[in-house]
Amino acid sequence: MSVQPIDPKKPDLEESTNVAEQHAAVTRASAAATREQQVRENGLEPVSIWIFIAGSIVAIIAGSVLFSSNNLFGYDKFVKAGYVQADEVGGVKTVPMGEVEAVYMAKGASSYNKCKGCHQPDGKGNAAFPPLAGSEYVIDSPVSVLMAVINGVEGPITVSGKSFNSKMDPQLNKSTDNLEMAALVYYLQNSFGNKVGKIYTPEQMNQVKAMVAERPEGLCSAAELDKFRKIQLEGDLFEPGTLINKKTGEVIEQEK
């Protein structure tokens, strides 16, 4: 058997290899890779500055339209007055309720968070701010304490026999919910050792709001608060143990 010598000018080249076809295949593969590279690079080109400008203009116009529409997402526009979301127990919807003392104490304590930085968590005040514990402005009348909280107080004042001369900014306002006002009064008059015991209704708070509306704007003085200490609210109080709606303050009629 004869062996054909290998041509040193064509190493590893078999007789069956078609050089022209292999060269064409390599050329096609190279061209495809080049096209793919061009497509990838084209996709990474930076976005035109004009596209950014046009998009920004559209965003500004849309934002101005959205925020200029006051009632677009207005809760009051789409929810009926007095609406309260009910809790669902066992497939039956029930109104969230509780005894008025417990409801008032919980809500009042939450509102008092705005005040305890000055009057302290125990209501005893400090060298700059008068105490609420034993304060005649808290105990004598719901009007004087609410006037102080809604309007603020400025100037010298004597509380529980001690003199103070500091400024207290308003913590509530004329539009504060009646339930929150009544709850705060109850909390202040029945905490820190105070034991007034009277449970005012949310409706009675309208009398206080009327007095607030009648007086000039500005902080109260001690002399003005002294006059409010003599005023009591008209109307029936809540009886202890009365069940009320936790969110509206409305009385829950019990089945007999």
Image (cartoon, grey):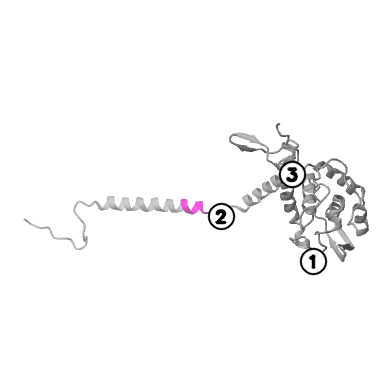
**226 or 218: which is nearer to us?**
226
The amino acid type found where label 3 is placed reads Val
Q: Is residue 97 left or right of residue 33?
A: right
Circle number at residue 57: none
Q: Specify the quadrant that holds the N terminus.
A: bottom left
Q: Are the residues at dot 1 and dot 2 in contact (C-beta closer than 8 Å)?
A: no
Separation of residues labelled 2 and 3 (CA atoms): 66 Å
Q: Residue furthest bottom?
A: 127
Separation of residues labelled 1 and 2 (CA atoms): 64 Å
Q: Residues within 10 Å of mark 3 (few under 14, many from 20)?
A: many
Circle number at residue 126: 1
Quarter-of-image position of residue 71: top right
Q: Disc 3 or 1, which lies upstream in sequence?
A: 3
Secondary element type, mark 3: helix
The residue at the point 70 percent across, 47 percent down is 63
Residue 178's spot in the image, x, y percent? 80, 45
Separation of residues labelled 3 and 1 (CA atoms): 31 Å
Label 3 belongs to which residue? 100
Residue 216's spot in the image, x, y percent? 92, 52
Q: Is label 2 or label 3 in front?
A: 3
Q: Residues within 10 Å of mark 2 (few under 14, many from 20)?
A: few
Q: Specify the quadrant that holds the C terminus.
A: top right
Q: Disc 2 or 3, which lies upstream in sequence?
A: 2
The residue at the point 51 percent across, 54 percent down is 44
**29 or 96: which is nearer to us?**
96
The amino acid type found where label 1 is placed reads Asn
Residue 66's spot in the image, x, y percent? 71, 44
**242 or 146: which is nearer to us?**
242
